[in-house]
Image (tube, grey):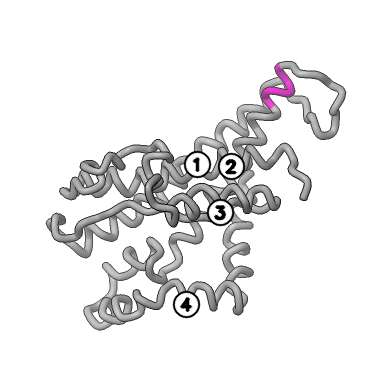
Amino acid sequence: MELTYQFPLFVVAWFLQMGLHEGGHAYAAYYLGDDTSYLMGKRSVHPFDHVEWNDMGSIFMSVLLPTATAAMGMVPMGMASVPVNPMRLKNRSRDMAMIAFAGPLGNMVLMILCLLLHKATGFLPYTNMVENPDAGVGVGSIVWLIDELCRCVYLTSALYAVFNLIPIPPLDGSSVLRHFLPRSGQSLVDSIRPYGFTILMVLFWVGDAGKYLYARLALLLAFW
């Protein structure tokens, strides 16, 4: 396995988007009355605040797995979470939906910032170091490297915004959808929650759900 210059860029991209995504959940929960994440030091956009360093499961999912998948030339894959106590929310269904949506919203904000920076590079010196490896370090090569980092962050954030909005527990989209369903529909979402990971594995590893996910992702990449 040969590492490329994109490996460290995708690792940085993973942690940046993770911080904004999980931080979005934590800030929304605090604003809506639940200070659980705040008391645990997780009301933050710093990605390391969302890793449970005394839990190997959290370290694997939030640090090791994303790093390993980035090393394999893939968009980093992993997971982190923010604790929320629904009992502290005034309007449980609505507030859980808002807290859930705040994560992908953080990804979208990061995507917009990266897109604006990318467009700004069109007005600056630009030297592609892959096409011109002998060009040397200069303003143009630094602008190119920043642009490449923005591309990796945009791609990673887009993937996780789209993926997390899938309405299957425990993904954020399920909490958003649940709020708008009648009671019978909410009961259905609650009933499949224990089997959510299994359903996702079947859909993406056995079925063709990945094709539909990347089709939605392609629409977002068209803006780049």
Question: Dot 2: what SS?
Answer: helix
203 inside magenta stretch: no
Identify the residue position indicated by label 1 in the image: 15
Q: Amino acid at mark 1?
A: Phe
The residue depicted at 65 percent of the width and 27 percent of the height is: 121
Q: Which residue is mark 3?
A: 65
Q: Mark 2 or mark 4: name the one nearer the start of the chain.
A: 2
Residue 217's x, y, as percent? 59, 57
Amino acid type at image mark 4: Ile
| Residue 141 belongs to the span the image colors magenta | yes
Give SS at disc 3: helix
Name the one closer to the observer, 120 or 144: 144
N-terminal of the two: label 1 or label 3? 1
Residue beneath the point at 24% across and 49% down: 29
* Lateral position of residue 96 relative to residue 110, left or right: left
Of the image marks 4 and 1, the number of the one nearer the N terminus:
1
Q: Secondary structure at mark 4?
A: helix
| x, y percent for residue 74 | 66, 53
Residues at marks 3 and 2, CA–CA distance in whole angstroms:
10 Å
N-term mark: 4 or 3: 3
Given this view, does label 1 or label 3 mark the residue nearer the observer?
A: 3
> To which residue does mark 2 refer?
11
Classed neighbour count for the residue bearing mark 1: other residues with Cα under 10 Å, few (<14), some (14–19), many (≥20): many
Segment tinted magenta in the rendering: 139-143
Dot 2: within a 10 Å radius of its alpha carbon, few (fewer than 14), some, or many (20 or more) residues?
many
In the displayed structure image, the side of residue 82 where residue 1 appears, left or right: right
In the rendered structure, which amino acid carries the disc numbered 2? Val
Viewer-nearest of labels 3 and 2? 3
Asked if the residue at tag 1 contacts the one at tag 2, i.e. Cβ–Cβ closer than 8 Å, the answer is yes
